[in-house]
Amino acid sequence: MFFVTDYSQNLNIFSGAPAGFLQAIRTFEGLRSLAMPVKAAEAGGATLFFIVPKTEGGQAFLPAFTDDRLVLPPLVSLPPADAALLLFHAPHHESFVFNSEHPQALEMLSPLRASRSDVSLLAGYFTSGGGAGGDLAGAAAAEFAAGRLHAAHYLYALAAAKNPDSRARFAAGSVLLELGLLQEAYDGLKAETDPEALLTLASIQRRAGGYQAAADLLASIPPGTQLDERVAVEKAWLDLEAGREEEAEKAFQRLSTAAFDKAEPLSGLGAALAKNAFKAKDKGKLSAAASALRSALATPSAPMARILFQLGNLYFRSGDMVQAEDCYRRSAMLAPAVQALGNLALTLLKTGKNAEAAAVTLKIALTDTESAARLVPQFPPAAIEELFPAPKAAPAPAPETAKPVEPPPAAAQAPLPAAAPAPAPVPGLAAASLEPAPLSSDRTGAKPAPAAPAAAPKAEQQAQRPRIETLRDVMSAPSAPTEEESRGDAFISGAFRMASDLEDELGRKVYFNPDGLGEAEKKLRLTFIKDKVDQQTKVDMVRDCAAFLCYFLQERHKGRLIQFPDFDPWGWPMIFEQPNLKLVTYPVQRAWRLLWGGGVPEPGWLAKYSVWLTERLRAPGPLPCGLEAAKKRIMSHAERLTDSATEHRRMMVLVSSLPETSGIELGRSGLFKLEEAIRSNFKPDIPPTTDGWKLLRCYGHIFAETLIRDLKGVWYNTDGEDGGWTLQFPWKTIVFPLGKVYKAAADRSGLVDYYDQLVQEKIRLQGGPTAG
């Protein structure tokens, strides 16, 4: 018998496809599978496989190919609906691409890019059968009521595209909300004033931690409409998340009896009862919580996957692994999120189903290797190698292709790295054009410095001259600690305490991922928003939330927190080292700032910090800095400026404690002492010692603080060495305060004259009295 392969099929299916994903989605029709290139990774003796992302422009895309013949093995091939669900629930990626360039790709085809929302549409296209006719809104409503969220999303999107003025766009917002696509739901409804849109916007604000904004939106919805029950349910959820547990429990109890749609009120009642039960260690209430959640599952509903996960957590914490396994399995079938799959794997292990637990762990690893790696130690050590075998050494057979494919060329040997270039001049030492005016000679009347010892030959002096050190130079980050070491650390252990407290309150597993960080931030904000919370409770909450953030960054990016024993935690830097980047940041300060007053930041500030850090580490190339940035008026990212302001604050605390600097007051009078100290401790043409650089850096921060206090300077660009850090004044002049001090040490130029000229420039451009 002969088998004939059809080589006439067009594999370049996205060539000429419409620009919009919804319009292009029918190009997927008839696909049997989606293939994703993978790579092996070792974790605790287990071999895991993860989808190899494609990076472009500093952004990482998860790739998929519409035919197995388009990609070199190793690969994983799944039915299209399953593949779309896998990509949708990938926790660390927001962008996806089909048939793109990739190291394992065999063809150069037209790619199709997709967002998480687009991938949901693709999942809905396959699970709904791809129908595009009839009563689309009615079909979408039926899918939503049955808990088939992606199908509802796809059909509502078709209905809204067909009739943009229909109410389908309001119903679609509820679907996006339940899918966790909060930004997409918000963007689609933010300009609307319809009560249904306002209700969805209120729920978005509540889930994002904007409790007051949610309350204001609910108050704007007129009573006496068919939305009254849903508004009451949302108000009860708001009470629960804002810490008013007793009021929430009573409201959900009433609504679970009176409301027509009981699933959401019963889910809320279960959550409220569980939260109060864990607080009071009340087994009766815990049983009542489980009963409420079981009642919520009596009929299919939109939040069914969420409720099953919630109930599974209750059973898991109560030790009923059989019931927990069933709930997690059903939840993962509807929404195969990493959290549901991870908890399912744990319950399978506890019931002795090691092989199935390994299969679930391998599925998790495809999009979240770190979470899968944390599961590996839970397996019996003797079984790990058998359950997670390494790939066989024999080469995989060549895949069928539409035409002969040349084998990839042998990888060229990577060139040796080029020698490090000579240090660039520090901008502050050469930026005379940016200074207000040339500086005069010595005006302090100080005696000339003693003669320097016999100078070395000029060439030798140049060879000896070091570049300016910064905090990044004098610190190094040892390897990241293990989880056991972190649990034993007096500070970092607070991360696990925070996670445990959140699990008690939420009734579900909390991971050290963006979702977990969001929950920690909510808890921190709530502590500072509530009335009558004592100061010690606030301090403890800040420490634990800061520890959660630090451990999250340690696990995700291999950062190492440097804990100075004689310094408050806000001044502890975390260091990340890569081949082309050494980044110093201050994560503890992001939580600690709440203790300094100034109000509670807007929701999501910790997430924004994490996103900035992730993007910076993914694109480690040099940023514009120093003289170049000043000339082009390029300001550093706000998070980088926060780090620089924190480093400056830490240095000023150090300045106040050192005998060499504590007597130098801030202001113009202190600059005379600063000039004298520089002349006494540093000689032209003689490079400072390591300790000398540290002292000189302290002098630089004293000068910067004087300019900040007297002339209202603010940090402007602080990328690169600190000699190139700039301040900008309200009249838009940019100066290099640390670089100016380093210049003064090198050529004895005066600081007082420089300060006076800045004051005169301020008076000329802004008017006002002379600073003191």
Image (cartoon, grey):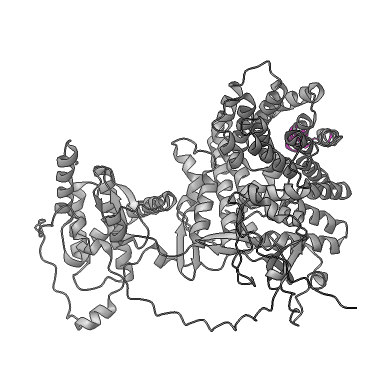
Q: Which stretch appears magenta?
A: 270-284
Residue 365 image point, x, y percent: 71, 62
Residue 253 image point, x, y percent: 78, 25
Q: How many marks?
A: 0
Q: Is residue 589 visible?
A: yes
Q: Residue furthest top?
A: 224
Question: Does the magenta segment cover residue 444?
Answer: no
Q: Quadrant of the N terminus?
A: bottom right
Quadrant hosting residue 621: bottom left
Question: Does the magenta segment cover residue 283?
Answer: yes
Seen from the viewer's position, the closer of residues 172 and 765 is 172
Q: Quadrant of the C terminus?
A: top left
Dominant secondary-structure state across the stretch colored magenta: helix
Residue 233 image point, x, y percent: 71, 27
Q: Is residue 626 shown left or right of residue 496?
A: left
Q: Is residue 770 shown left or right of residue 241?
A: left
Seen from the viewer's position, the closer of residues 708 and 329 is 329
